[in-house]
Amino acid sequence: MKPFPGEEISIGILGLRRLNHVTSRLYNFDLRSYAATSLIRKIEAVIQRNHLKDIDALIHLLETRSSFFPVFQSQLSYSCSELFRDPAFWRSFRDDVLPVLNKNNQKIRIWVAGCSSGEEVLSIAIILYEAGLYEKTSVLVTGLNELSISETRRKTYQDKQLEISESNYKRFSSNENAPISRYLNRKDNRFVFKDELYKNLRYEVFNGSETNEIKGLHLVLCRNYFIYCTPEYQNEMLGLFTGSLLPGGFLAIGNKEDISFCDDFSRYLVFNKKEKIFQKRPY
Amino acid sequence: MKGFLIVEKYTGDAVMNYRLVIIGGSAGSFQVVNQMLAKLPQDFKIPIVLVLHRLKHVRHGFVEALSQKSNLPVIEPEDKSSIRPGYVYLAPANYHLFIEVNGRFALSTEEPVNHSRPAIDLSFKTAAYCFREKLIGIILSGANKDGAYGLKAIKQTGGLTIVQDPMEAQIPVMPMAAIERTGKVDHIFPVNDIFSFLCKL
């Protein structure tokens, strides 16, 4: 039996506090906005991945080598996803949301927020491409730092990693004869998604605390990001999204996420209850 | 954690106040859980968390199937929701289910553990951390070893550990692994004894 992930490393709440003291003081990075259990697991993974002995070794590294901080931040925000996760969501997005966005002959502006893995971005790019809307859409993708952005923007995949995405895509398109592989190029033993899909994607660093607001959006796609936030930070981030969206703009969150406890909840209409798509009230 | 009804049970001279029952199972456990939900009384107050391996792309239908004969309401918890007495919570498809340090549910999309998402080990371990000796952990039939470390964690933090009798389980791999890893589980019960044990709480 393999050891239970993180069984030997136990950092607890006290370790977390000491670590946060360092990241806040030296790098202005406050860990208190993250949900504790996930954060502890992710820090344990960072410790293992960098072959460190314990949390003290991690703290020491962050104190003495500032070049390690972006690595730490990027590994912390890393998540592994699949393309077209929840095919029913993407069908609703294609059939119900896109027609509304496409009503006026305007440019469609989308923000894929809190996006630590590139799969949500690629899913949306493929849908826009298939709907013939790719050219008139600008997609903003934000990550915590340059390193995590560069790691997600031209991700390569192994055959096996794409199996789930392939079956999701088939469920989404209901077309057995149109595999997702037509969007792939082979690169040595791995696969990359074709350049066309990346053409209108704009990547930017966004750490949540910045004051330069993102305005005038038609859609904020933010699925399975709030699960890693404390309720307070989620509330704050939702406020930021509300401010970014145009009246009538859409917000999509993960199908088991909840915003009903947030201050701004009343500013949204429920557009699709099951798939957790909300529409900002027009007034 | 206000709002919990304290249920008392005599074990010798000690009074135990269990506040959560967490159950893990995989292949062969669905029938057992279904029977259990039919047998537990309507006024069973201790919240129950079910972490059952399930098809990741089938999000709907499982709650409905479990609800059919259940005397208790079965729901899939949403992120950050609180754990309320009288409810049965089913871990949703394609997420890990954690008990957060504040006693609420938390979800995660981190990689599968033991090829599973939800992974029983993770739910059990986080529940053990939060509920300690107020927790009952139960492992049912299953074909992989997920849950073994989790049950051990419950044992280590003073919780009560129960495993379905491997002789009786449809697939004994999961119960066997849990017994082996935990060392000395508190009870190895056939399902009927698990039911009557819970009903007496």
Image: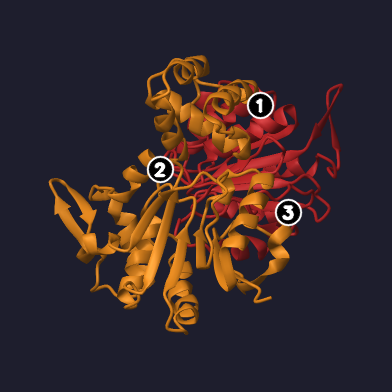
Tag 3–tag 1 contact (CB < 8 Å)? no
Which chain is displayed in red in the rendered image?
B
Provide the residue designation for mark 2.
B115
Provide the residue designation for mark 3.
B39
**Viewer-proximal residue, A5 or B121?**
A5
Residue B81 position within the rendered picture, expressed as x and y whole percent measured from the top left? 70, 51
What is the secondary structure assignment of the residue under circle 1? loop
**Viewer-proximal residue, A43 or A121?**
A121
The answer to whether B13 appears left or right of B81 in the picture is right
Residue B71 position within the rendered picture, expressed as x and y whole percent measured from the top left? 75, 59
Q: Quadrant of the C terminus of chain A?
A: bottom right
What type is the residue that disc 3 sits on?
A: Lys
What type is the residue that disc 2 sits on?
A: His
What is the secondary structure assignment of the residue under circle 3? helix
Provide the residue designation for mark 1.
B186
| Mark 2 surroundings: few (<14), some (14-19) or many (≥20) residues within 10 A | few
**Viewer-proximal residue, A140 or B15?**
A140
Picture quarter containing residue B183?
A: top right
The first of marks 2 and 1 along the sequence is: 2
Labels 2 and 1 within one chain? yes
What type is the residue that disc 1 sits on?
A: Asp
The answer to whether A95 appears left or right of B90 in the picture is left
Image mark 2: chain? B
| Mark 1 surroundings: few (<14), some (14-19) or many (≥20) residues within 10 A | some
Q: Quadrant of the N terminus of chain A?
A: top left
Could one spot residue B102 in this view of the protein?
Answer: yes
